[in-house]
Amino acid sequence: MKEIGDIGLAETALLNELKQIFHHIRLAGKAEPTNLEVGLEILKKLRQLVYEDMNQLQHEALILKAAKLLQDEFYSAVAVNWVWNPRQTGSKDEPDLRGVGKDGRAVVSAEVTSSESPRGTIDKRMSATLTKLSAMPGDKYYVVTTEEMERRAKSKLQSLGYEITILRI
């Protein structure tokens, strides 16, 4: 896991990456498809340039937002060092976001999803993520962005019996 450090600086780095994505989108948008084959090739190149980054940047931005909210609203009286796996690169034993106290122990473990709807693979992945999170140290949070994801996560927690707080931000 990597230390977040200054959240404002991390947000600035994400903004710069976001600007690069939009630069690629604008460049691709200038290409005029003359036939279906050319149009599909333009889409293929655009997808190669921006698809994964679009996914990851939303995830990273949500992790930073969660760290800010947790620090400001729940852990302002506690010295917490925030560490993260910004590109969903954590092992099965690591959350997306962890708050570590001065003694080196985990105070917070949080998983974050920017998915908006709990259908299909997302629904199955939610169960696995909640199970993974339940075994982690510290206070546990599952961070979502939509009411639909919040409802589904709460429903799953009721049946699974885990003590995890759902945060919708």
Image: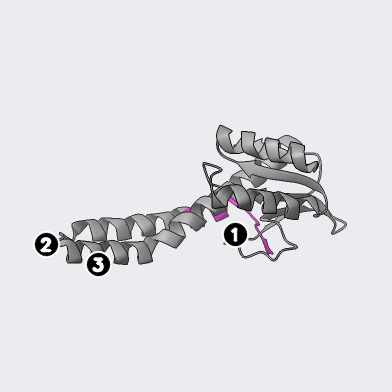
Q: Dot 2: within a 10 Å radius of its alpha carbon, few (fewer than 14), some, or many (20 or more) residues?
A: few
Kind of residue indicated by mark 1:
Pro
Task: Name the spot of residue 48 as percent of width and height, x first.
Answer: 37, 66
Q: Which residues are magenta?
A: 1-14
**Vertical position of residue 72 compared to residue 133: above or below:** above
* Residue at image location 70% in from the left, 56% down from the top: 95
What kind of element bears circle 2? loop
Tell me the residue that label 3 is attached to.
41
Q: Is residue 5 magenta?
A: yes
Q: Is residue 16 visible?
A: no
- Is residue 73 toward the left or the right of residue 14 in the image? right
Tell me the residue that label 1 is attached to.
86
Quadrant position of residue 154? top right
In the image, which disc is placed on residue 121? none
User: How far is mark 2 from mark 1, CA to CA?
Assistant: 39 Å
Q: Dot 1: within a 10 Å radius of its alpha carbon, few (fewer than 14), some, or many (20 or more) residues?
A: many
Tell me the residue that label 2 is attached to.
34
User: How far is mark 2 from mark 3, CA to CA?
Assistant: 11 Å
Residue toward you, 70 or 159: 159
Task: Name the spot of residue 120 as percent of width and height, x first.
Answer: 54, 49
Quadrant position of residue 152? top right
Residues tagged 3 and 1 counted as in contact (Cβ below 8 A): no
